[in-house]
Each structure stands twice: as C-alpha cells, then as structure tokens.
Image: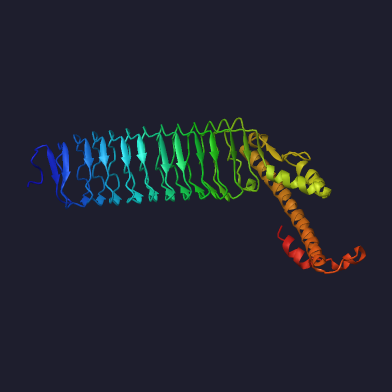
Amino acid sequence: MSSNTSDNDDVFEYIRNGQRAPKDVVSVRFHPSVTKVGSDAFEECTLLTSITFPSSMVEIGPAAFCRCRKLKEVVLNEGLKIIGDNSFNACSSLEIIKIPSTVTDISDGVFNKCSSLNQLVLNEGLEKIGMFAFNECISLQSINIPSSMTVIGRYAFIHCKKLREVVLNHGLEKIGAQAFYGCKSLQSIILPSSVDEIGAYAFWSCNSLKEIVLNEGLQVIGEEAFTKCTSLESITIPCSVKKIGRFTFRSCTSLREVVCSEVLPMIEPTTFDGCHLFGRITSPNISTRLDSIIRAGQVDVQNKVQQQCINRCDIEWERGGTIYIPAEVYTRGSDTRRRECWNSVQRHFCRIVKWIEYYEIKEATTLFELALWKAKIDQEEDDIYTHDRAAYRVDVPGPVKDTITQYL
C-alpha cells in the first residue's frame, strides 16, 4: 500500500516515524504498527480537520501538528505518554482536549495559541505543565489542576484572557513565574496548603482578581507577583512567609488593607507602591497577644510599647485595640524618606514582638512551675496541709530560663 494513499484517495496513511505528510492532506489514518508521530510530520497541514490516535500511539513528536489551523478535533489515546514541545502549537480551531491518564508531563508550548480551545480536561497523574503550554488560549474559561501536579510551569497559562476559574488542589507546590500573567478575567485564587512558592509576576495584571487566599505554609512570594491586580481590596499574608519580592502588590489600586504579623520585617517600602487607596497594615495576632499579656498583669509591657515604640514612629495602637501602620508611611516624602520611615517602623515592630515573646516565655515558665508543684501534691497519698504545700514548689533553674530567653 502506498504511504500516501489508501482505498480512499483523500485519506493519507501514516506508516512510519520520520514520514512527512503532504500539505494538502485532508484526512489521516495511522498504521497499527505506528507508535510515534515524528517531528513536524503534519506541520502546516492546513486542510486537516480531525485526528484520532490509535491505541498503539506512545509519542507525538515536537511540532508534529504545528499550525494545522483547521484542526478542530483531536482524540488522544490512552497509552500515550509523550506529547512533544509545540506539537499542537497554533492549532487555532482546536476546541476540546482531554489529556489521557498515561501522560505525566505537558511539554513546552504544546497548545500555545490554540485560540478556540474552550474545554480542557487534565488527568489525575499529570505532574507538570511546561512553559507556554497554554499561552494565549483566549477561549479557555476554567481549569482544574489535578492533585498529582506539583509544578505549574513558567508562562503556562499566560494571556488566557477569558480564564475565570482555576481550581488548585492539594499536592501543588509551586506556581511558576508568569504562570497566570495577564489572565484578565480570573476572579479568585485559593491556594492549597501544599503550595510553598509563588513565582515572580505569577498573577501580574489579573485585574478582575478580587479574592486571594494565601495558605499557611507558603514561604516565597515572588517579585511583582500580584502587580496591577486592580480589583484586589484586601490580603492576608501568612506567618509562614519568609520572603516577599519587590513591588509584590504594586499598582493594586483598590487595595485598602493588609493583614499580617511576623512577616512585617520582610515587607519593603516598594511592596505597595502605587496602591492609592491603601489604608493600613494590621497585625491582629500580635495585638491579641499583647493585650493578653497586659491583662495578665504585665503592665510594664504596655508602658514600653507606648513610650519606646508608639510615641517614636508610625505604629498606632490603643490598649485593647489593633496594632497597625497607617498608609502615610508609604506616601510621605521622597523614596529615600519613605524607606527610612519604613525601616524605623520595622525596627520598632520587631522590638514589640520580642517583648511579647519574652513575657510569653516568662509566663509559660511560671505555669510550668505551678504544674509541677500541683503534680507533686497530687502524687501524695495523704492530704497536704496548706502550710506544708510550699515545700512542694519546683523552680525551673535560672540557667534554663536564661537559655530560653537569651535569644529573644
């Protein structure tokens, strides 16, 4: 049988890897022995409208169907393992793709500029989405990232302008740089507890993004990760965050409040640059801890906070209320003046946190001593008279206390 014809002259039969189809091919059939479609095999076959892969197919080579602009239907077979780089790049009529369970990696640029793609089913078992895999898939509206995936690659869904919903499941660890860059219809993002890094520019210019729930366990927020998210009104930064890049929330023009606690020392003056409605950074956790210590009788802490911090910088606080930093810290004077002001706020805030930690340890040590005392009394078989109970007191040795507190 000819490699180019069959009983139907309009059907091209693909019989071996390395074979190149003529540009005017209308329909294709794969020989049962074929396990791989070679690189560029059907590139720019602009009359090809549908492809169904046989169960024998294991690999689709790089750019195999690149720029097949009328290719509307592609049925990928179970058993397929590799979809090569750019294999369906610029197939602008392709509407539906279901990734088989046997595919673990979507390579770079596979569905790049598939502008009609509106339905995408990602399989459980998928581990990685490569760079530009779904770049400019402007008809795509929703995706569900399977729990098997650990990394969303750089630029993976960049410029998917109609993408409204993204479901991220537990198991995901990293969102790559610019992964959702320019997804202008995206409205909310809820990160699962497994995510530890958001890459630089990951959600840049997602200007419909109103809700962002950052997970406890997140450690790194990259540079300009949420720049120009102009619908975002508030954000809570988890205590687990160890690094925040420059200009993270730059030009978030609706942002009014940021809630954080121990992460405050990592925030730079540029973090909220251009946030014109930004009102304050609040620290409810620190506020609650401080109030609890004062209620326990440590009034000297209140005096220290008031005299040495509140009266000397831009931190504001009233007994029983919330500690916060007003927006003037970011708008006052030149860039140099703002940086100096912010550095002063950070130093004083760190002092407040260390005082709180010191008195919490001190209070905990006292409670520990009382617990030991009660335990010894409870172990006695006979009743202990009140005047004998002092003999059962157990003091935590001074060196132990010193060891605990010297690093605070």
For the residue pair 148 and 211, the one nearer the viewer reads as: 148
What residue is rendered at 72% in x and 44% in y?
288
Image quarter of residue 369: bottom right
What residue is rendered at 76% in x and 63% in y?
401
Image quarter of residue 51: top left
Say whether residue 386 is left or right of residue 51. Answer: right
For the residue pair 29 and 155, the one nearer the viewer reads as: 29
**What is the basis of the colouring in this image?**
rainbow
Query: How many numbered marks, from 0 up?
Result: 0
Say whether residue 197 is left or right of residue 52. Answer: right
Residue, far right: 387
Where is residue 160? Give x, y as percent: 40, 35
For the residue pair 88 and 310, the one nearer the viewer reads as: 88
What residue is rendered at 78% in x and 46% in y?
305
Say whether residue 294 is left or right of residue 44. Answer: right
Classify 145 as above or below 26: below
Where is residue 274? Give x, y as percent: 57, 33
Considering the image in quadrants, where does the C terminus appear?
bottom right
Image quarter of residue 404: bottom right
